[in-house]
Amino acid sequence: MSVEETIKRIQSQKGVQGIIIVNAEVLICNAGIPIKTTLDNSNTVHYAGLIHQLVMKARSTVREIDPQNDLTFLRVRSKKNEIMIAPDKDYFLIVIQNPSE
Amino acid sequence: MEHVFVYTRKRREFGRPCHFSDRPAELIVDILPDAGLRAEFVERNPLPAQVQCGPEWSEHEVNTERLESEARGMNHVEGGWPKDINPLDMEQTMRYRKKVEKDEHYRSAIVRLGSIMEHYIKQNNAVDIYQEYFTEGQEEDDEEEEQEQPVARTISVFRDPGAVKRWVTALSWSPAGGCKLAAAYSCLDFQRAPPNMSYDSYIWDLENHSRPEMSLKPASPLVCLEYNPKDSHILLGGGYNGQIAYWDTRKGSHPVETSPIEVSHREPVYKVIWLQSKTGTEAFSGSTDGQVLWWDIRKLSEPTEKLVLDLSRKGDLGHALGCLSLEFETTMPTKFMVGTKQGLVVSCNRKAKTPAEKIVCTYSGHNGSIYALQRNPFFPKYFLTVAGWTARIWSEDVKESSIMSTRVHLLDGCWSPVRPSVFFTVKMDGTLDVWDFLFNQKDPTLSLKVCDEALWSLRVQDNGHFLACGSQQGTTTLLEISSGLCTLQRNEKALASEMFERETKGAKILEEQQREIRLKERSRSEQSKEEERKESEKVERAKELLERAERHFFHMVEGGRMLLNKNGSDHLGVQVL
């Protein structure tokens, strides 16, 4: 199963507005680099930068409370949509979905 | 029993240095137990005693130092790229991206994450996890919650940035949502304004409490300030020297136009109100010089109409009443009311043909000058006046007395725009009172000490949730009221109108009685004038009074004696005699 197929499958689900794959390597400052995206550039950069920081914070929070624990998934539900983040050691997969009413 | 200790000192010893010496304890008074008193007490057996076994709690409040915050924006530029790659160069970024995509880690990670993600997406689509299941039960919960104590909380404080503190004499929320608050600063102490006091008034944005959003620079300090209810950029202000000026916030801090001094008021303008008109440019102002002037802001060079508040209807400025507050209700565009310094509320009709007919009637009953006057937004027939020592609610039909009144020294007040029976007042000692007339008529429902100095002005925002009050030291405090006080209860309108009608009826009946008594007295005195035995009648009446007083006295004594016999103790007897 390749990356393309995965992304296409996710994209075809109901309500999905966009997918971003971010590289988590922190070299300079705290921004992540967007590798692949289905949104426009400015939005992508926005999401990548902000969500990267959020995931780092969430992960460190979980780890501090219990060092054996780790972050597996993060959902941010807002009035207009839901941002779902699946973190990995080096990459994040971010999906923005409009939840069904 | 008073204990007095007296010591004498010779006059030539005054001022001498004190020589302290040690002295043994001296018994000054010794009160021994009196066995006789025991008879007045009854031994209580069993005696309730309370014991508590629980952790001891103590409550502490800490206020941090004021935080000056500023909002700054940051431009997010793409970052995170490794040093050798220029983020603006498309080719390099493309190449970097392709390189990452070829990485083995990448593929496996993304495939794994993809399957996890799919699970959650499907979950989202299947069930709405935030759906409300038991809405009926929730409503009941809400009702129980409302039984809790009403509470008002200070949200933020806006301080006068100037060095010299001035009073906040007027507040005005911006229309349609009200996220801006305009405050007029001036010093109303006669001729005691410090020389370097700044004349500015400010517009505050609710989000930013460290600095005003805009300052308005008039020629003299503003005593009152109002936003135009139709246009949120236009403000009208009345100054301490009697001039009226209007600002357009898009055009800057200086007034767009000011009325010339010759045709303006001769004393500080205490209130300006915008009128309901097609052009939305008309307003009227009142001041203590006894005049009410109408203006059209497009032409501030002279007032369009003038009214002198002279009760004898002669237009005489010398006898006119000083006007401290004005009231105008948009549903009744020809009528308006004026609250005067002398404690009278004058109701006037604007469309009267002659100036004499303009003053329709007066409502008397207040002892002090009327600081605030407002009609109930739900029942325009009833209005609230706040004067020296009382706040009273009047009905338009009853002219002699108010239908309800309270007893505290107040400076400003206003109705809540969402609940017909709730109104707010502020006091000289810095307390804010919230009154709910359906709940308790004698005491405020909630009394909150906002600050230590006197609060001069008060304004509720249109949604009834927030209110701002301004103090003598130039601080404006923004408070949030608990939802119980600002949500309309179910039959509140009906209950409030019932209550108002009841009170009006009561007041009318009282008025009738008063009138009858007066008529009787007048007719009686006329009769006695006709007869010539005026004096003997007086004497007779005096004798009657004496007899009545004696009878009353003996009746009291008899009553006391009967009580005496019942209790069988001597004390009462001693007192009566």
Image (cartoon, rainbow, N blue to C red):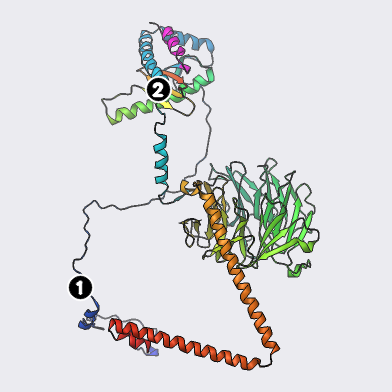
Measured in 3D between alpha carbons, the distance from the residue under mark 1 to the one under mark 2, in whole angstroms, is 71 Å
Residue B339 in sight here: yes
Quickly name the residue at label 2: B127
Q: Which residues are magenta?
A: A1-19
Q: Residue furthest left?
A: B45
On whether residue A9 falls in the magenta region, the answer is: yes
Q: Is residue A29 visible?
A: no
Residue B541 at x, y percent in the picture = 57, 89
Give the quadrant of residue B193. bottom right
Which quarter of the image is occupied by the C terminus of chain B? bottom left
So how many labels did they put on this image? 2
Measured as percent of width and height from the top left, residue B40 is found at 25, 79
Mark 1 residue type: Glu
Residue shown at 22% from the left, 79% from the top: B38
Q: Residue at x 36, y 84 (%)?
A: B560
What is the crowding at mark 1: few (fewer than 14 residues within 10 Å), some, or many (at least 20)? Answer: few
Task: Tell me which amino acid carries mark 2.
Answer: Val
Q: Which residue is denoted by mark 1 in the rendering?
A: B43
The chain letter under disc 2 is B
- Kindly identify the residue that appears in the image at 70 percent across and 66 percent down: B321
